[in-house]
Amino acid sequence: MTANTIAINRRRNPFAGHAEVWLFGYGSLIYKADFPWVERRPARIRGWERRFWQGSHDHRGTPRAPGRVATLVPAQSAVCVGMAYRITPDVFDHLDYREKNGYLRFSTDMHLDNDAHAQGLVYIATEDNAAFLGPASDRDIAAQIARSAGPSGPNSEYLLRLAAALRELDAHDSHVFALEQELLRLQRQQG
């Protein structure tokens, strides 16, 4: 699959005709909501875990030196904590562009902070997209993050802001926090 997924996502619209849609964010969408929203609430989805296995050629890296950003991978007993936004469908023009580097819209069941359930959408970069980098050691992922930067800024900022946002949500993510510690160790060595 091509890395640019804008056209594909415009055809993936299971909520056509709805005035509002819930969107689940698990990466930068937790802390960087650069779009209008009607309501914002902590949420979680089951059966997925966050991993820094997606390459970023357009935001936190370049085509020659991609950064690493979060995607979700299936994990049967996992619970991924993030942020849910109730949005109007016109926001998808912006979101499809923002998430164009390999991310596809999928339907998901969300559990909102008051134990309410909602159906909504989530952007996931699956392993068949051209920007997918896959697993690596924490040390290798952190080193790539430490040296990467793109139009949206340093890749390290993405990781550190995500870790801080997860702490604000009182959410433990061993993968993110291990990468954060490895990145901070590398920064101390270089500083």
Image (cartoon, rainbow, N blue to C red):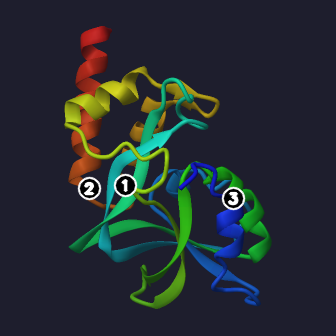
Badge 2 element = loop
Packing grade of label 3 (10 A; few <14, some 14-19, many >=20) is many
Residue at the top extreme?
Answer: 191
Q: Residue at x 67, y 79 (%)?
A: 13
Q: Residue at x 32, y 9 (%)?
A: 191
Question: In front here: 12 or 119?
Answer: 12
Would you say 78 lies left or right of 122 here?
left
In the picture, the disc for residue 47 is none
Residue that label 3 marks: 6
- Measure how far apart labels 2 and 1 are at the Cα level: 8 Å
The type of residue carrying mark 1 is Leu
Question: In front here: 129 or 124?
Answer: 129
Residue that label 1 marks: 166
Q: Residue at x 71, y 83 (%)?
A: 20
Residue that label 2 marks: 173
Residue contact between numbered discs 3 and 1, judged by CB atoms under 8 Å = no
The type of residue carrying mark 3 is Ile
Residue contact between numbered discs 2 and 1, judged by CB atoms under 8 Å = yes
The type of residue carrying mark 2 is Asp
Of circles 3 and 1, the one toward us is 3
First reached walking from the N terminus: tag 2 or tag 1: 1
First reached walking from the N terminus: tag 3 or tag 1: 3
First reached walking from the N terminus: tag 3 or tag 2: 3
